[in-house]
Image (cartoon, rainbow, N blue to C red):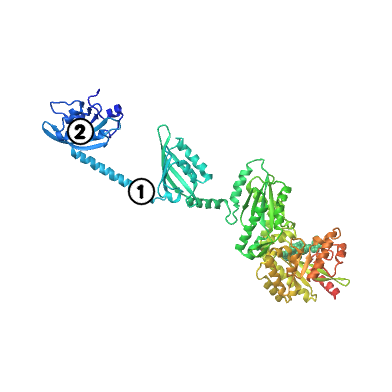
């Protein structure tokens, strides 16, 4: 042997053996029983040595045995034999060392080395030290036991599922808790990767594999991913998976361990929060924020072409007032479904607030857009029944086309809305395209609104009523049967707005309710005055849709009549076809109440709305006013003549009095007079007259009637 004594370095370097921590047991020997050689460490040599006898680093087995007492030699030989025969890997024996006739007790621990043919012997002379060693060992064992207990507690108490994946052997072990939810028969299973993938939902397998790749390829020691798994109970569970792994020196993965956390509840909350950010909770449609974000993306393309529609429900306010909010909400949901179904292939439907919806279309010309909307409009033209209520839900639509009418989400939304607000009365329930003039009109509209309010508060300043005579032919004479009270507003700040704009502005806000009552009161007073003058004729007042839901308005009418001393039978309330049909039930009730106090009810502008003749027979009305659109083309349009004749016959059958509006020429009058006893109204007879003028003229007309 090159070295006289061996040490641990020697074991490591020469024999490639590493058994004990360095320097813990310096007194040891290595027994090579094939060669019958014992190699001593310096410490061991020191143990055997006597002052006059220096022990060499290498000796035969017999030579070593000679240092032991006879009994100890036997024990030693037996220990070596048991190790050689593979009966044990380790022996611990108390032996006697005989040195200069003195016995020294020692503990000899011998261990079979992995390398065949070698036994390592460690000599403990100081038994106290050995006690210390075993105490330390016990301590370590106790700590290990405690660690194991803690480990078990963590595994059992944790809501997480702990895993360990032996990548080399493709074996996976889960903590027992995981068995409750994951579809596993055993918590340890082979063919691990395939089994793991099998319970990840198919759409998320890619997420798992992609996130696992950096660990498998040695690029990362960590793995982190969120994916869904199918549970034992057949539910979908969101999992947050994180772990840390080990690789060999070549970067090949060996094992990874970590935890799976059930984050289903958190995901649901996240989804709710993101839904709140992106979706309208009531209809499930996307919201304004979503519109802005999605449009931003679309408009990034400078060649993008398309349009934005702003849609609202006609007279939604009335639905709200009549039926209450929860039913009105149902109407909104129903309406959103209709948009979804009948404006097909759209790029997005969004709900703003209230009854305002946006639709994004790829169509960018008026013709294309109108064609696209035809099925929707067609569908809405029919009545529907919701919770037993018969409803007419109509849509008003404003359109902004991009890039011409705007290049940002905000501009398009604003301009589509402007088009919607600015739709002329004649274009109700129609599609209105944005024009730049609309903006000026909108500003004017807001200004008008505020000025109207001020004047209204100032004792109805600048408001007045004019009266247009309603004529009846008695023999050869045309006599005044009554008069229609028509509202006028005259403010020097507004010289150029027309009557329909005034009514629209009042209807748009709720001012019509207050103004409407004022109109009734004025008209009743005026009519009472005519009566006092000895001219008992009727007065007609126009009633807007909103007024139908003005609770107590019938009692108000009764009061006005009482105060003025006029029998309510001299009053006729004119309701437009659309306001009646839109709220069929409520309006029907309203008409019945009016009739119960003796007041007449006229269906105004008949023929301009959507109603079918069928409704006429079930509506509680007394008069039918045929819109001037049918009358004015009477000469040129034979079709109109037929309609007029039909309406006349129908009203006769139903016992209604017919009134023909808009007679402005003699020719028209002659055609109308082919019917028997119609009431007539039109510029041919009189334009609407100031109250004063009317009072003056009435005397003549009454006189001639008598
Ligand atoms: P309407 O109830 O159909 O009233 C008849 C309208 O036709 C009046 O217009 C009248 O001036 C006009 N007219 C009558 N004869 C002729 C004719 O021969 N030729 C032409 N071109 N027009 C004729 P006006 O006063 O501009 O009223 C328009 C609409 O405004 C009314 O239509 C009515 O719906 C509404 N309105 C007027 N006053 C009130 C009111 O006090 N309350 C409510 N809610 N609406 C009102
Ligand atoms: Mg009228
Ligand atoms: Mg009319």
Could you tell me which quadrant the N terminus lies in?
top left
Quadrant hosting residue 62:
top left
Secondary element under disc 2, as helix, strand or loop, is helix
Residue for point 10% across, 32% down: 101
Q: In the rendering, at what x and y percent does residue 328 appear? A: 62, 61
Figure label count: 2
Q: Residue at x 68, y 44 (%)?
A: 305
Q: Looking at the picture, does residue 86 appear above or below residue 198?
A: above
Q: Which image quarter holds the C terminus?
A: bottom right
Look at the image and tell me whether residue 422 can be seen. no
Which quarter of the picture shows residue 247? top left
Instruction: Pick whichever, 569 or 89, lies toward us.
Output: 89
Above-or-below relation of 489 to 342? below
Q: Nearer the viewer, mark 1 or mark 2?
A: 2
Do residues under tags 1 and 2 come within 8 Å of each other at their CB atoms? no
Q: Quadrant of ligand 1?
A: bottom right
| Left or right: 650, with 20 as reference point | right
- Which residue, as the protein is rendered here, is positioned at the far front? 85
Q: Which residue is mark 2?
A: 77
Residue at x 24% of width, y 26% of height: 35
Residue under numbered circle 1: 152
Q: Is residue 333 left or right of residue 701?
A: left
Q: CA distance from mark 1 to mark 2?
A: 45 Å
């Amino acid at each position: 042997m090159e070295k006289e004594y061996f040490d641990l370095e020697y074991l490591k370097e020469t024999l490639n053996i590493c058994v004990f921590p360095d320097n813990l047991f310096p007194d040891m020997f290595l027994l090579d029983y094939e060669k019958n050689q014992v190699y001593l460490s310096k410490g061991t040599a020191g143990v055997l040595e006597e002052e006059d006898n220096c022990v060499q680093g290498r000796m035969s087995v017999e030579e070593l045995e000679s240092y032991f007492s006879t009994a100890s030699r036997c024990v030693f030989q037996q220990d070596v034999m048991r190790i050689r025969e593979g009966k044990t890997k380790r022996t611990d024996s108390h032996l006697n060392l005989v040195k200069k006739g003195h016995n020294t007790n020692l503990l000899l621990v011998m261990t079979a080395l992995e390398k065949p043919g070698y036994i390592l012997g460690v000599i403990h002379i100081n038994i106290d030290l050995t006690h210390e060693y075993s105490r330390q060992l016990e301590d370590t064992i106790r700590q290990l036991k405690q660690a194991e207990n803690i480990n078990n507690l963590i595994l059992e108490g944790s809501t997480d599922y702990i895993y360990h994946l032996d990548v080399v052997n493709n074996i996976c072990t889960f903590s027992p808790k995981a068995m409750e939810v994951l579809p596993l028969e055993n918590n340890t299973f082979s063919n691990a990767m395939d089994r793991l993938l099998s319970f990840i939902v198919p759409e998320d397998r890619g997420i798992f594999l992609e996130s696992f790749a950096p660990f498998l390829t040695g690029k990362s020691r960590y793995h982190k991913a969120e994916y869904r798994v199918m549970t034992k109970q057949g539910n979908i569970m969101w999992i947050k998976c994180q772990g840390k792994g080990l690789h060999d020196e070549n970067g090949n993965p060996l094992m990874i361990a970590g935890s799976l956390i059930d984050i289903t509840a958190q995901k649901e909350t996240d989804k709710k929060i993101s839904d709140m950010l992106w979706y309208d909770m009531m209809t499930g449609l996307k919201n304004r924020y979503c519109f802005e974000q999605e449009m931003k993306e679309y408009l990034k393309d400078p060649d993008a072409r398309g349009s934005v529609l702003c849609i609202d429900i006609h007279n939604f306010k009335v639905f709200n007032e009549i039926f209450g909010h929860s039913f009105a909400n149902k109407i909104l949901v129903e309406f959103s479904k209709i948009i979804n179904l009948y404006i097909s292939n759209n790029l997005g439907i969004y709900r703003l607030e209230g009854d305002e919806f946006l639709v994004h279309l790829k169509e960018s010309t008026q013709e294309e857009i109108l064609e696209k909307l035809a099925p929707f409009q067609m569908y809405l033209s029919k009545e529907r029944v919701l919770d037993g209520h018969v409803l007419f839900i109509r849509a008003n639509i404003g359109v902004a086309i991009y890039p011409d009418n705007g290049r940002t989400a905000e501009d398009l939304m604003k301009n589509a809305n402007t088009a919607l607000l600015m739709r002329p009365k004649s274009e109700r329930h129609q599609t209105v395209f944005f024009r730049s003039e609309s903006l000026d009109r909108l500003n004017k509209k807001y200004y008008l609104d505020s000025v109207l309010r001020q004047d209204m508060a100032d004792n109805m300043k600048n408001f007045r009523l004019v009266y247009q005579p309603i004529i009846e032919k008695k023999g050869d004479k045309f006599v005044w049967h009554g008069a229609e009270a028509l509202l006028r507003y005259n403010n020097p700040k507004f010289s150029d707005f027309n009557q329909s704009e005034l009514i629209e502005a009042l209807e748009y806000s709720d001012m019509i309710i207050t103004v409407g009552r004022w109109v009734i009161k004025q008209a009743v007073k005026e009519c009472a005055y005519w009566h006092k003058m000895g001219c008992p004729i009727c007065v007609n007042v126009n009633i807007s849709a909103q007024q139908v839901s003005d609770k107590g308005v019938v009692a108000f009418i009764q009061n006005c009549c009482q105060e003025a001393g006029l029998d309510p039978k001299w009053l006729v309330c004119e309701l437009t076809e659309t306001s009646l049909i839109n709220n069929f039930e409520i309006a029907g009730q309203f008409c019945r109440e009016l009739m119960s106090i003796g007041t007449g009810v006229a269906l105004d502008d008949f023929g301009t709305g959507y109603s079918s003749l069928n409704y006429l027979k079930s509506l509680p009305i007394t008069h039918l006013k045929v819109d001037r659109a049918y009358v004015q083309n009477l000469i040129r349009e034979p079709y109109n003549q037929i309609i007029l004749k039909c309406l006349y016959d129908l009203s006769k059958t139903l016992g209604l009095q017919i009134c023909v509006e808009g007679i402005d020429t003699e020719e028209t009058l002659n055609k109308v007079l082919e019917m028997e006893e119609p009431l007539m109204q039109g510029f041919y007879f009189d334009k609407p007259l100031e109250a004063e003028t009317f009072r003056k003229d009435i005397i003549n007309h009454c006189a001639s009637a008598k």
